[in-house]
Amino acid sequence: MSYWQEALLILGMMAVTFGVRYPVLALSGRVRLPTWLVRALGYVPVAVLSAIAVPIMLAPQGSIALTMANEYLVAGIVAIVFVAFTRHLLWTIVLGMAVFLALRFLT
């Protein structure tokens, strides 16, 4: 693929992404959404994050690994328990990464 083909591909992806998202953002101030929909949309970030994180935690090499040797799973469980008690996102990320790195490089 040449430089110009890559540039056109990136510009095309940018145009499609912008074209799909801009109308929603432009109309968001003018259209009043029902309360039940606003409440439901509050769960979207949690659902997306779960859809990304859970497969990585449960099957890091492609097959399910529910063992203590799975650093992703152990660090994820530690982070989930920590955030359940503290509700502090930054410290949860720091602790989860510290546990993951300790398990990965110290064992």
Image: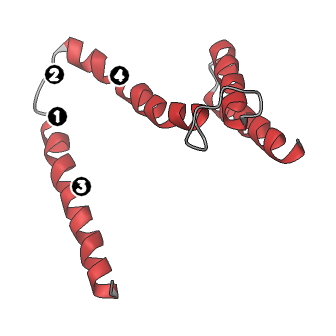
Amino acid type at mark 4: Gly
Name which quarter of the figure residue 25 lies in.
top left
Dots 4, 1 in contact, CB < 8 A: no
Q: Secondary structure at mark 3?
A: helix
- For the residues labelled 4 and 3, the Cα–Cα distance comes to 22 Å
Q: Earlier in the sequence, mark 1 or mark 3?
A: 3
Residue topped by disc 2: 33
Q: Is 6 placed above or below 107 here? A: below
Residue topped by disc 3: 17
- For the residues labelled 3 and 2, the Cα–Cα distance comes to 23 Å
Identify the residue at horizontal 33%, vertical 83% (top origin).
1
Q: Earlier in the sequence, mark 4 or mark 3?
A: 3
Residue topped by disc 1: 29
Where does the image place residue 18, in percent across and percent down from the top left? 21, 56
Q: Earlier in the sequence, mark 2 or mark 4?
A: 2
Dots 1, 3 in contact, CB < 8 A: no
**Image quadrant containing the C terminus:** top right
Q: Earlier in the sequence, mark 4 or mark 1?
A: 1
- For the residues labelled 2 and 4, the Cα–Cα distance comes to 13 Å
Q: Secondary structure at mark 4?
A: loop
Judge depth for marks 1 and 3 and give the one in front.
Answer: 3
Q: Nearer the viewer, residue 25 or 5?
A: 5
Q: Nearer the viewer, residue 76 or 40?
A: 76
Q: Secondary structure at mark 1?
A: loop
Q: Is 105 placed above or below 77 here? A: below
